[in-house]
Amino acid sequence: MVRSKSQKVAVVAALSGLVLTVAACSSSDPDSTDSSGADGTSAGAASLWVTTGSDEVLQGSIDALSAAGNGELTMQVFENDPYKQKLRTAVSAGEGPTIFSGWGGGGLEAYVEAGETESLQAVFDAEPELRDRIFPSVLAGGTVDGEIYGVPYNGVQPAVVYYNESLFDEVGVEVPTDWDELMAVVPVFNEAGIAPFSVGGASKWPYLMWIAYLTDRIGGPEVFDAVVAGEEDAWEDPAIIEAASMIQDLVEADGFIDGFSALDANQGAAEALVYTGKAAMQLQGAWAYSGTYVSAAKDFVEAGDLGWTTFPAVPGGAGDPTNVTGNLSSYLSITSGSSDEEKALATDWLLHGVMSDDYIDTLMGTGAVPPISGLEDKIADSSAPEWNQFVYSSAEEAGNFQLSWDQALDPIQADALLNNLEQVFLLQITPEEFAANLNEAAQQA
């Protein structure tokens, strides 16, 4: 079965995504669960806050730490969407955990600038063999001003196009490799009573992959680099306006399933539409493979009905079609307000427990692909070698990997981006208004 039209591109986006992020609330928060049964932090112990996703893999490493008598970690698990605000509030109030997870980029930079996160540069410099195992593009996501503040702890997660192969066979069309082909299959699927794409619009963040890929395909990575750099009127670059216009063209062509704005991305509803045959495709991070498709529709995957490919090229665009967007990985960082004893325990675990050989084996057992060099033999022997190799090679070979826009930006711009992008998809504002609104938000940041 052909899994993709271009197997180089999909994985790096998976890096960015990463699907684990750590939450930032106390154990009394009603949305959290304390997976270790402990409460609070005591001497000789440290606390770890994460979101749902890779908590089972982390728990194995935590159990190994405890069994070896090297300390105790208490892990709390939270839902993804409220995470960032909870983390921001807790850490600012001095009530955060010893170790917290995030996506790197602008979010991590904000904690660094506030003096709330410990630099790990010195300890990595002391053990360069550990640092050099990590893909440089991924380690860069946890680096601010040349210093390492975040350690990747889950798989590379590019945003990829998943598709139902049987539906393509049913309607007699090929998986699109460029935007013109994509727009051409939309009416074919609609005439067959099949939605071309599903998307969890109620969560807003799935919309980001569309604007990021289209902007990159049209104008190249330099367009968003200018936004991140704070260049004047960077949001009004013609590539961004054209990307928003193309999204609205797709919406107006009924490219998305009816009611897409009400679908919750955290409940697997968008994936379910693909594996139940109601939607042909979905643009989503690599985390959806093991997190939903394998766990919720194992028979569908094992039957060879799930396909994957890279985001289509845009004819005449300046961007390299091997470029990817997504989450390089999720990162674990140490709060500056922790005690020296907690910091010592946390540092030792981050360097030697996270991404140890046993941890890598367990992580790969979930279908994730760690951003660690020299895993070719493990990938060949994994339970999903074709998928894992697709992700791994994409991470290594992509022309550019762009961290998810909301994570690359400061919180003010990120919130404005999500709110305005939702209005683009709902046809409530024009592409020009989208760009102008974000320029205004950038001036306030």
Image (cartoon, rainbow, N blue to C red):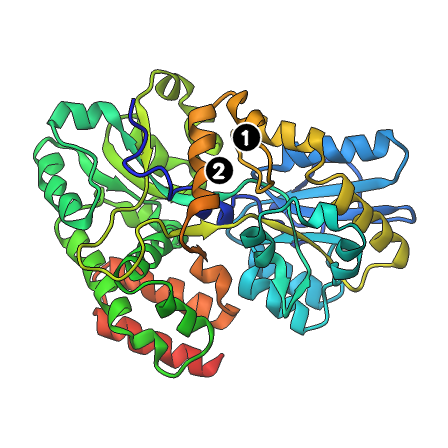
Amino acid type, callout 2: Tyr
> Which residue is labeled 1 in the image?
376
- Residue, x 62% and y 51% (percent of image)? 331
Residue 40 shows up from this direction = no
Residue 336, horizontal then vertical, whole percent: 78, 64
297 relative position to 215: left or right: right
CA gap between label 2 and label 1 equals 9 Å
| Mark sitting earlier along the chain (2/1) | 1
Q: Is residue 202 above or below residue 376?
A: below
Quarter in which the N terminus is drawn = top left
Circles 2 and 1 in contact, beta carbons < 8 Å: yes
> Which residue is labeled 2 in the image?
392
In the image, 262 versus 52, the foreground residue is 52
Residue 192, horizontal then vertical, whole percent: 10, 31
Secondary structure at badge 1 equals helix
147 relative position to 373: left or right: right
In which image quadrant can residue 155 be found? top right
